[in-house]
Image (cartoon, rainbow, N blue to C red):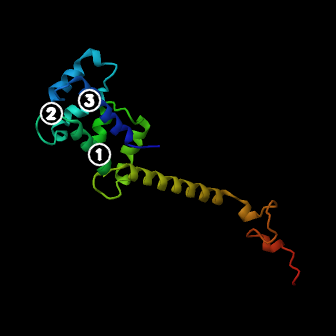
Amino acid sequence: MTSLSGIYAGLNSTYAYLASQYKDGLTLENIAEARTNTDNLMNLNQTFASYLQTNFSALDSDGDGILSAEETTNSISQMSASGLTKAQLIQLYSSGASGISSADYSYIIENFESMDTNGDGRITDSEIAAFKLSAAKMEKEDEMNHKAATNMSVFYGDDSSSSSGSYSILSYKYKNNSNS
């Protein structure tokens, strides 16, 4: 299922990992240092660390230069509630974001405007789910319409019909009419 929750979880776990290394608080300099530290190569998700670094000032809501767990949790909760912009998704995607598959990213970015039903420039998990449901419904309707359009038994009749009262368009001509 296409969902943004993997992104939010990735941001949260990346923050937790970085914060565990810096007991005096996570600063912009700490993030930059951690991203270049070769000891972190296996444990640090560079994409989410890059996002934290690039958006540090927006995440640091009190402006004290230290990113707290509360600020991070509040920011991620706000992102989850209000959704992500196309620019945010592209930023995460272009840096190789994890937490969501490339196919899901492509699907979301390709259909972003259609998914953004309230027109606020952001998409939420509920908008994605509603779009997918609508798309699946339309696909099923198209499939049924195609099946009906290509089903020649509607025109010529079908001997396998379970109802003796069902006739094709031409069957009236050959119908045994006992009332005549």
- Residue matched to label 3: 49
Q: CA distance from mark 1 to mark 3?
A: 18 Å
Secondary structure beneath disc 2?
loop
Q: Which residue does the image show at 30% across and 39% down from the upper left?
A: 90
Q: Disc 1, disc 3: CB below 8 Å?
A: no
* Closer to us: 98 or 5: 5
Secondary structure beneath disc 1?
helix
Local crowd at mark 1 within 10 Å, few (<14), some, or many (≥20)? Answer: few
- Residue matched to label 1: 77
Q: Which residue does the image show at 31% across and 18% down from the upper left?
A: 41
Q: Which residue does the image show at 16% across and 29% down from the upper left?
A: 28
* Closer to us: 169 or 104: 104
Of the two numbered discs 1 and 3 in the rendering, the one whose residue sits closer to the viewer: 1
- Sequence order check, earlier mark of 1 and 2: 2
Q: Is residue 152 above or below residue 7?
A: below
Local crowd at mark 2 within 10 Å, few (<14), some, or many (≥20)? Answer: many
* Closer to us: 163 or 16: 16
Q: Is residue 47 above or below residue 88?
A: above
Q: Amino acid at mark 3?
A: Ala
Q: CA distance from mark 1 to mark 2?
A: 19 Å
Q: Amino acid at mark 1?
A: Ser
- Residue matched to label 2: 66
Of the two numbered discs 2 and 3 in the rendering, the one whose residue sits closer to the viewer: 2
The circle drawn on residue 30 is none
Q: Is residue 85 visible?
A: no
